[in-house]
Image: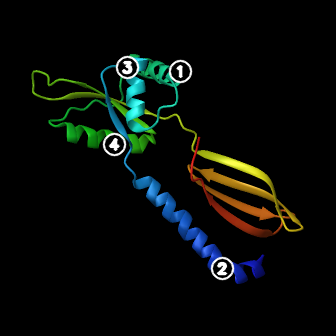
Amino acid sequence: MKEFLKKEWKVLLILIIIVVGYFLYQNNKAVPLATIKDTSPQSIASGQLATGKFKSLNDAKEVSNLIQDRVKSTPNVVYMTNTQQDADKKANTIAKKEKADYVLKETTEKNESGKIENKYFGVTQEKNNQLVAGITATDKNVYLTVGYQRDKMEVLIHTKDFKSISGASILYSIKKW
């Protein structure tokens, strides 16, 4: 293992920099936000389309049911703002904190005090973390492969006997379907 690290320290350093940079990039991205008329499956589907998260009408029905269940309970945080921009910024901050995939916003007109009332629904559906295992064959060598996948980034460690690392790979998914 020490010899491997001495020989391949530059490659490992580059891999670590890529992984750290990727996670920093992912944490600074804004959460997609879409305005919806109500919490009906059709309105949810249009909001999902606007955020690029639409999968199917059944999926929209599932999200609608989740929101209906959440609406029945008392909200944890209630806030009012003077402008939609302030409200959206606050919703994005809360969505990042809750690690939501996207946010749906139901807006009511200004009330008698002149404040805009918004209901935000942070939706978390995607399973972003995966552990992967398999076999890698190169030339005449066969390696056991264990890895971790987050979003589109995958890190693999190759080993013959689980005692020493034979190599490492970082993969990036170009397209998901």
- Mark 1 touches mark 4? (CB < 8 Å): no
Q: Earlier in the sequence, mark 4 or mark 2?
A: 2
Q: Give the colouring mode of the picture.
A: rainbow
Residue that carries the numbered disc 4 in the rendered image: 92
Which of the two marks, 2 or 3, is nearer to us in this view?
A: 3
- Mark 4 touches mark 2? (CB < 8 Å): no
x then y, percent, for residue 38? 33, 19
Residue that carries the numbered disc 2 in the rendered image: 9
Residue type for callout 4:
Asn
Which of the two marks, 1 or 4, is nearer to us in this view?
A: 1
Q: Earlier in the sequence, mark 1 or mark 3?
A: 3
Q: CA distance from mark 1 to mark 4?
A: 26 Å
Q: Foreground residue, 18 or 75?
A: 18
Residue that carries the numbered disc 1 in the rendered image: 58
Q: Foreground residue, 39 or 137?
A: 137
Q: CA distance from mark 2 to mark 3?
A: 53 Å
x then y, percent, for residue 89? 27, 43
